[in-house]
Image: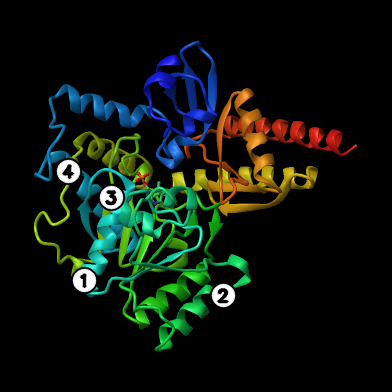
Amino acid sequence: MDIFKKQESNVQSYANNFPVVFSSAKGCWLHTEDDKRYLDFLAGAGSLNYGHNNAVLKQDLLDYIDSDGITHGLDMHSQAKADFLTALRNHIFEPRKLDYKVQFTGPTGTNAVEAAMKLARKVTGRTNIITFTNGFHGCTAGALAATGNQHHRSCAGMPLTGTSRIPYEGYAGVDGLALFETMLNDNSSGLDKPAAVLVETVQGEGGLNVASNNWLKRLSTICQQYEILLIIDDIQAGCGRTGTFFSFEPAGIKPDIVTLSKSISGYGLPMALVLLKPELDIWQPGEHNGTFRGNNHAFVTATKAITAYWTNHDFEEHIAQRANQVNKAIQRAMRRYPSLFIRGKGRGMMQGVECKSGAISSAIARICFEKGMVIETAGPDNEVVKFFCPLTISESELEQGLHIFEQAADIVATKLIKKAS
Ligand SMILES: *Cc1c(COP(=O)(O)O)cnc(C)c1O
């Protein structure tokens, strides 16, 4: 443990809440050096939707490594990349009647967001990008300008420009889209005509705020009407997290650009994509370059994740059942502990519970950890306890986790009563 204090930068954050040393992991379990095990309700912030070291994905990766399959390939053609593009096209795009070209960016979410913003600006010749209150899109300068969180923004060290923010659905009781349209039509609103709107359908870091299907449809219509590109940042909400492969499917919209990362490789390997409508593909070769755009190990596991989980509806059915289980536990906890909780938030396996304060949610997360579960909080004051286990979790494992959460809630509620009396 000492080595981390002595040697690693203070910039580490998750480690502060879970101060143990993990050595191995399988499915939804994390194991420490000294043989303790923790149920993983964080799942790499949504990068491990198929669990740790998923056996099916792992075998393909082992076989690939064993055959000396190419590991690093810049953006050169490889069999692994061809297989991935084919699987994506046949099993994801075609059944959903989507037509996208695929851009491989550097392997982080924020890099995909940078590329998407650049492309929208290049295509439209405009600079401004509309973003939303409580949005999170990454920590490099361009994407950071689109991110709301002050903690992240405050260390930019330079002006964060080129974006304008409007209220997300439900924010401060304002109809953000009505406001947006009014401002677009007002020659002196001061809102420069945007290149694009960049939005999450469920705000992962911002507190599991959900945009309704109706709101997303309205947004999409406004974008079409005013020739503004619609970018859905599906980095966290995509890859099945909300119940469907893309989070925007239930809204019936077809975004112009989509960013994917986190669980797209399926195995927790770094990988990020920009999906763009073919007519937007005006990139010149190498304009948005990056050394690690060809992580072939990630392509192998990404291909397998698609063919193993997304060629029929079984997995979606499984996610729906688990989501229902989470929802019931949240409802039950709210009935039992009205002193702690305000409301359930999110949808699918992207749900959580809003606590009356960040102190309450942090206390719950801390007690969960003591009881053998890794779980995090989200939202402007970290007031939302976020249930983010692998989607592959079994009914009984999920029950265990939800039970730990209820025990933690019980302890915090009892302490509150003692304090008050
Ligand atoms: C995590 C996340 C990002 C940034 O991804 P990194 O890999 O951390 O750079 C961007 N957008 C959303 C919605 C995210 O959840």
Q: Which residue is mark 3?
A: 111
Question: Residue 311: x percent and y percent?
Answer: 35, 47
Name the residue at 52% across, 66% down: 168
Q: From this viewpoint, which residue is outermost toward the right?
A: 421
Q: Give the side of residue 387 with respect to residue 260, left or right.
A: right
Q: CA distance from mark 2 to mark 1?
A: 29 Å
Question: Residue 308: x percent and y percent?
Answer: 34, 39
For discs 4 and 1, the disc positioned in front in the rendered view: 1
Using a 10 Å C-alpha cutoff, classify the residue at mark 2 as few (fewer than 14 neighbours), some (14 to 19) or many (20 or more): some
Name the residue at 35% across, 51% down: 157
User: Looking at the image, is 100 positioned above or below residue 384?
Assistant: below
Camera sees residue 229: yes
Q: CA distance from mark 3 to mark 1?
A: 18 Å
Using a 10 Å C-alpha cutoff, classify the residue at mark 4 as few (fewer than 14 neighbours), some (14 to 19) or many (20 or more): many
Q: Which residue is mark 1?
A: 123
Camera sees residue 242: no
Using a 10 Å C-alpha cutoff, classify the residue at mark 1 as few (fewer than 14 neighbours), some (14 to 19) or many (20 or more): some
Q: Which residue is mark 2?
A: 175
The quadrant holding residue 158 is bottom left
Q: Give the side of residue 381 with respect to residue 291, left or right.
A: right
